[in-house]
Amino acid sequence: MSTPLLDVKGLHAAYNNAVSALHGVDFEVMRGEIVALLGANGAGKTTTLRALSNLLSAQRGRVTAGKILYDGKPTEDLPAGTLVERGLVPVLEGRHVFPSLTVEENLVTGALWRRPSRHALKRDLERIYDWFPRLRDRRTRAAGLTSGGEQQMIAIGRALLAEPKLLLLDEPSMGLAPLLVEEIFQSLVRLNGELGLSLLVAEQNSAVALRHAHRASVLENGRVELSGTAADLRRRDDIKAFYLGQGSHVGARA
């Protein structure tokens, strides 16, 4: 079997050296795969993505045990910026656009570390506008005046300009209308198919995530309670219990 692009083993994390948030999380992402990380609010999804991106310290958190291998190499000593340069690029919860910059200026910030030529940057921007046509029409508009769905597209497009191998997305559907959620996920599937881009998507919206992912893991109280193919998990009658925080009885049947 090929080596996973991302291999997470026995991951533990805590905040303020006191509040345990992850308790031995295990999962992997293969190259060219879409993996969904599912669970209710507070299950540990955001903490997991922060740990993978080496951003926990910004929230007074730290990894206390376990191992994270990205592209076959440990990540614990690498700054977040170095991980981005190596292709592990996060899209944080809440979009985080620069509101006073235009849509295009926001996108360009994702490519700054690469220092692309003007020709290469123009080509890359055209690809973003092809994947997210709404942004082409709003390229000169201040990002703070765009809709929530458009801001999510900006955040994803900005990350794509960093040329990721693995894109980490934290709650991309949060606060968006169903049609916009579907539009964004269709774009992610297209990126996966056209570029072979690997994606790890943390989501509460199990229906849309399981419809588009290849595999999924369900987190509850900082632990992985279920893992399998998305098709198998869609068929489980008990899956919704995890999103309601009522999954403690499910483990005996899993």
Image (cartoon, grey):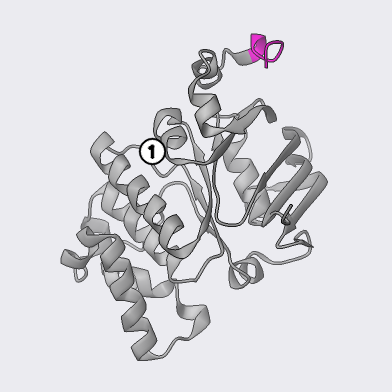
Magenta region includes residue 251: yes
Q: Position of residue 153 (x, y in %)?
A: 33, 56
**Residue at image location 80% in from the left, 49% down from the top:** 67
Main secondary-structure element of the magenta-colored stretch:
loop
Q: Which residue is mark 1?
A: 174
Q: Position of residue 213 (x, y in %)?
A: 48, 41
Q: Position of residue 230 (x, y in %)?
A: 52, 33
Amino acid at circle 1: Met
**Residue at image location 26% in from the left, 43% down from the top:** 180
Q: In the displayed orientation, state which residue is furthest to the front.
A: 1
Hey, which quadrant is residue 23 in on the image?
top right
**Residue at image location 64% in from the left, 64% down from the top:** 80
Left or right, residue 19 beside residue 198: right
Hey, which quadrant is residue 4 in on the image?
bottom right
Camera sees residue 40 = no
Of the pair 90 and 144, the residue shown nearer to us: 90
Span of residues in magenta: 248-254
Of the pair 133 and 40, the residue shown nearer to us: 133
Of the pair 64 and 162, the residue shown nearer to us: 162
Magenta region includes residue 115: no
Camera sees residue 108 = yes
**Residue at image location 30% in from the left, 39% down from the top:** 176
Q: Residues within 10 Å of mark 1 (few under 14, many from 20)?
A: some
Which structural element holds mark 1? loop
Vertical placement of residue 96 versus 158, above or below: above
